[in-house]
Amino acid sequence: MTSPVPQTAHHPEPLLTMEDLWVRFHTRTGIVEAVRGIGLSVGREKLGIVGESGSGKTMTGRAVLQLIRPPGEITARRMDFQGVDLLAADERQMRQIRGERISMVMQDPKFSLNPVMTVGRQIEEAYRTHTRAGGREAREKSLAMLDAVKIRDPRRVYDLYPHEVSGGMGQRIMIAMMLIPDPELLIADEPTSALDVTVQMQVLAILDDLVSQRGMGLMFISHDLNLVASFCDRVVIMYAGRIVETCRADRLEEAQHPYTRGLLASLPEVDRPVATLPTLNRQDSWREEPGVDAFL
Amino acid sequence: MPSSEPGAAPLIEVENLDVVFGYGAQAVHAVRDVSFQVMAGETYGLVGESGSGKSTVLRALSGLNPDWTGNLRLAGRALERERDRTFYKRVQMVFQDPYGSLHPRHTVDRALGEPARIHGLDRVDRRIEQVLLDVGLGPAFRFRYPHQLSGGQRQRVAVARCLMLEPDVLLLDEPTSALDVSVQAEILNLLGRLRREHGLTYILVSHNLAVIAQMCDRLAVMNAGRVVEEMSVAQLRAAEPTQPYTRQLLTASRGYDRAAAEAMESFD
């Protein structure tokens, strides 16, 4: 099922490696297994993680940063980020990693920005928490970052509160905040699905440059197969908490697993009209069959 | 295509529609001088990005937003700000979020029965059974609550509720954008089949050009409250859009491209 995975030419060594990762939730009605023993690594590349709602893709991203609260529980044989054992790290150590070395852009800016703090101060705070920068430097750096995410009038936006900006602008502000500490790995969970296509393309171009020019690693979590195929280097396809297939992004069209094939077929396309869209015929075996690993 | 029949009268006419929210300096001109016609049996698409005014057009047509000026006509008769029962008997609406559009404490049976009781229809039992079959759910779903249904099943219930009144027109506001792609395909197929079987006329609002191309005969591209361009889906496919905004939308719908991203313009 696995097509050959490309070795990223310049940086073949992984930044992050996870082996046999499980995320379980202990509930009144039993244990819910959101992620079921996956293995993957991320290098200085754009790794796409795709799947439908409930496939475990978001939980995989959150598990990296240990952002799963009880009754959720994370276990793994190995979770290594640049020599740091993330499973053994305590809260103090995790706080030094979160934001500074690994950061995360969430889907919805409405719930991720502080409503009683201006946009500019929030970005500044992200910078000053992780550096020893003074006020003026932090302000200048924040304005430059707002400009980098294509916000047209950074000085005006700097003093606005989150409720005064649109959803698309809020998402770009989130991205600016997450990028300002210069992380080595960025986990982006549906970062552009709230954005208009024009802005979406511009934000993707920013992320693209950060990976190719600064060697950042990117875990790009998305339900949009076309976008991932055209944007990422490698793709991981998740179903029911497992990785069912992994391949080069530009070879997604040639994917073999019936689930991946079914998803691709069910997408309407502007240039290929069909009388009836093929629908997915889910098989119980997809849930039971062993997953594949997606190591570099 | 119904639109090509010469002399056929349009079922829905929108003429010089303007919608303004708020007053004075705070006023937002959400829809600006929008005009289009929809023939009976046609699926007409309104495509655009967030804030383009596409949903506002639909809400003015549906009677949910009375603050509009211009002329709206259904089968040649002018629509007032307030609509009566005969209007809703003919025109029904499906909303984007199937999690929000069904009452969480009403069973499917009650949700489906409500429009029939409001309109004083007879044979409510029979009708409920029939619409459940029509949308591919079957009688087993009749006494379930929304939380016992998946997103796709809820959207089927929302469509079934519209069908209870045997309407002529369905207004579809992003009916699949909250659903996974495999479920989206099922709902689009369902809507296509119902249109053919019941002779329905659709206005479909979506930000997704591929969805519009799959479902529609003709479409209007909206940006910043205006119709930028109106064309047939065949023209869209043949990449004949004349407006740069439409061309950009078409490029973006084909996926990420570094060079194209660089060339993206703002059309606010």
Image: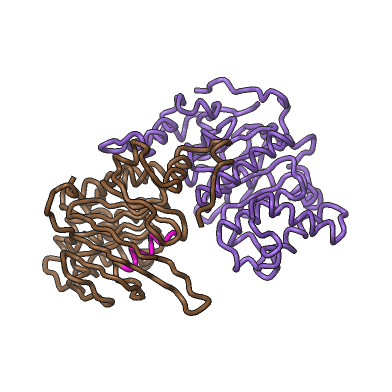
Chain colours: A purple, B brown
A34 vs B202, left or right, is right
In percent of width and height, residue A268 lies at 36, 39
Give the farthest residue toward the front. Answer: B242
Q: Residue at 58% across / 36% down in the picture? A: B258
Task: Based on the picture, tell me whether residue B91 belongs to the magenta stretch.
Answer: no
Q: Residue at 58% across / 48% down in the picture? A: A191
Quarter of the C terminus of chain A within the rendering: top right
Range of residues picked out in magenta: B52-60
In percent of width and height, residue A22 lies at 61, 40
Splitting the image into 4 quarters, where does residue A128 fall? bottom right
Depth check: B192 or B180 in front?
B192
How many numbered circles are shown? 0
In percent of width and height, residue B180 lies at 42, 46
Depth check: A202 or B193 in front?
A202
A160 vs B105, left or right, is right
B2 vs B268, left or right, is left
